[in-house]
Image: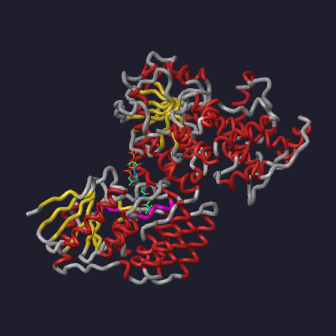
Amino acid sequence: MAATETINEVIEVERAGDIALIRIDNPPVNAAGLKVREGLVAAIDALEADMEVKAIGLYAAGRTFVAGADIREFGKPPVEPWLPDVVNRIEGCAKPVVVALHGTALGGGFEVALAAHYRVGAPGLRVGLPEVNLGIIPGAGGTQRAPRLAGMRMALDMITSGRHVPAQEALEAGLIDEIREGEPREIALAAARDALAGRIETRRTGQIAAERDEAALDEYRERMAKQAPLLFSPHKCVDAVEGATMPIAEGMAHERALFRECQDSPQRAGLVHAFFAERAVAKFPEKDAEPRDLQKIGVIGGGTMGSGIATACLLAGYAVTLVEVSPDALERGLATVTKNLDGAVKRGKLDAAGREATLARLDSATQIEALGEADLVIEAVFEDMGVKKEIFAKLDATLAPGAIMATNTSYLDVNEIAAATSRPEAVLGLHFFSPAHVMKLVEIVVADRTAPEAVATGFALAKKLKKIGVRSGVCDGFIGNRIMQHYRKAADYMLLDGAHFEQVDRALEDFGFAMGPFRVSDLAGLDIGWTYRKRHADTRPEEERYVRIADRICEEGMFGRKTGRGFYLYGEGESGPNPAAEAIVESERAAAGVTPRSFSDEEVVARYMTAMITEAARVVEEGIAQRPIDVDAVLLFGYGFPRFRGGPLHYADQLGLAEVIRRIETYAQEDAHYWQVPGLLRRLAAEGKSFAELNP
Ligand code: T1G
């Protein structure tokens, strides 16, 4: 008769004759926190001592096997038993231990599995050692046991990429022993019976000898040097795997030492912060409201933005109607969508049949009235308040009650747009980033009267599009562009004062940004910033130092990449600085009476980051962003901020807020208008607090 015994809150043991089953039940993802570790050791100890038990099956409840160590415990003093000891206890068990894996067996979860004596995967299983994404290496034997089972090359591939390996591939590589249909409990029970009956062969991974693969080690060292020169842990992954030829105990000691180095690295803290940022943004005040069920989406505007949004919606399975004013413009918009889909086919994201099926869901019109059945409409025409108001008034007259109206404006006042309708509660901003079918971020802009259901629908849409939605209040530029406008000026000031734009770009790229600010401007089109600055010329404070360099480059018809010339030259072969832009810089310095001085790379980064932190703090202070972590998410997922640095406000915490204030006050001696300490920053510093404490 089966009897169940509770070991602790998360571990249960069930006896079925001479088989015992250990069940892990620690929702949502069965992370191997302290209770799981304690419970596993206690269960193995008890079952090993129990004369009636001949074989042990291990499995997990819920949607997945163990998804890793508990990331929330990182950075806190580790409490015994540590996972490496737990894993060794399982491998050392005198009785056969088989494990049934379902969902994802990741990190510490897969390390537990590697230590069991036989591994059965349910169909759909994915295994992986994704620690590198968190700035660490597998720390519970993964770097030692994976190569023993699958060879160094496969282990290096998995561990340096962190990728999830599908069941079939894991089987072929020897990482699991078998794939079986069934529920995890049934699989564990049947496999334990098989082990007992000698129908399957169990073995201890730690006793297998790994062969040194010199070629693979060299290749991955080289690859990591090229792919991840700024990162710490990918290189340690290779060093760790190299130790797998040693006896398991020595190999694990080698792994442990490298793991500790990674744990102490600020990159680990930054990457873990980014992991939580990606998830924290989904906790917004309106999250309990019922999102509207979306079937049909209208997109107004067939330019780069509108076509990209339409592509993203089509790829997520929606029926999309694209609206443009003229047949010609519509034709161009549809051609862009088709080109985007062809790109998806080329990247292997879509097959030919999928492309046809996707295009079949695309409809088009030259009249807004064609959108009568749309559940949601996203307006993405050029930035003109008059035009937008006209469109929203028409939408108001066209759409069914309950339909949602979104604007993709980057800067304009969503309250004013909403006021052009009789139902402001149905209006919000959905600010996508270009190219919209690729970029991860969507700012969900909540206006004064936006209904919770509309907000929830915006988030649900972002999720369906596999994007990261971040809630923003209304202000000029919302979270991201507002902060960008500010730190972009810091780069312009340095340029005017003597730094070369190429140096500024390189210094920031060396810091980890995907692209320096001047290269970004060239890519986006210098005319975009120019238009913005012209629109704001009247409201610019008189005390503000104004840098005319980019305007003058535009006046020469040089708009960046799209015209072949901007700050840099584009064309055949290498692109270098544009001598015409350099000449403009010099003449503007002369006109402003500036004696150019030199900047160290450190100073470039310090000024740029301090400016970013300053405006980010204001955005939090004013409630435009709910929490510092939302700002971090915006910069990480929309502005190429280096993931390993966690975001500007996480970085501010790492610098120390007193240091940030010291810098602002130093710079303020030359430009007191631009460099001002935000009240929130001063308050936090005075109370000895950090931005992290504002992230509940
Ligand atoms: N620890 C703590 N919480 C975790 C967690 C973990 N390992 N994984 C997920 N969560 C939380 C997550 O924050 C969210 O919480 C909820 O679970 C659902 O997650 C010694 C040191 C498993 C593929 O890196 O990749 O093992 O927001 O929204 O989309 O070598 O979670 O609801 O409050 O992501 O279905 C290695 C990380 C750890 C795996 C599921 N493991 N997790 O995706 O749900 S390091 C990982 C994932 C380690 C050892 C080392 C995904 C998932 P909340 P979710 P999902």
Q: Is residue 609 magenta?
A: no
Q: Residue 484, can we see it?
A: yes
Q: Position of residue 59 (x, y in %)?
A: 26, 62
Considering only vertical position in the picture, is 500 above or below 24? above
Q: Position of residue 532 (x, y in %)?
A: 69, 31
The residue segment tinted magenta is 123-132
Looking at the rendered structure, the number of numbered marks drawn on it comes to: 0
Q: Nearer the viewer, residue 195 or 665?
A: 665
Q: Residue at x 18, y 71 (%)?
A: 50
Q: Nearer the viewer, residue 173 or 313?
A: 173
State left or right for residue 630 relative to residue 611.
left
Say how the picture is coloured.
secondary structure
Q: Quadrant of the N terminus?
A: bottom left
Q: Nearer the viewer, residue 666 or 487?
A: 666
Q: Nearer the viewer, residue 341 or 418?
A: 418
Considering only vertical position in the picture, is 90 above or below 628? below
Q: Residue at x 49, y 53 (%)?
A: 344
Q: Residue at x 72, y 22 (%)?
A: 539
- Say which quarter of the image contains residue 92: bottom left
Q: Residue 332, can we see it?
A: no
Q: Position of residue 584 (x, y in %)?
A: 86, 42
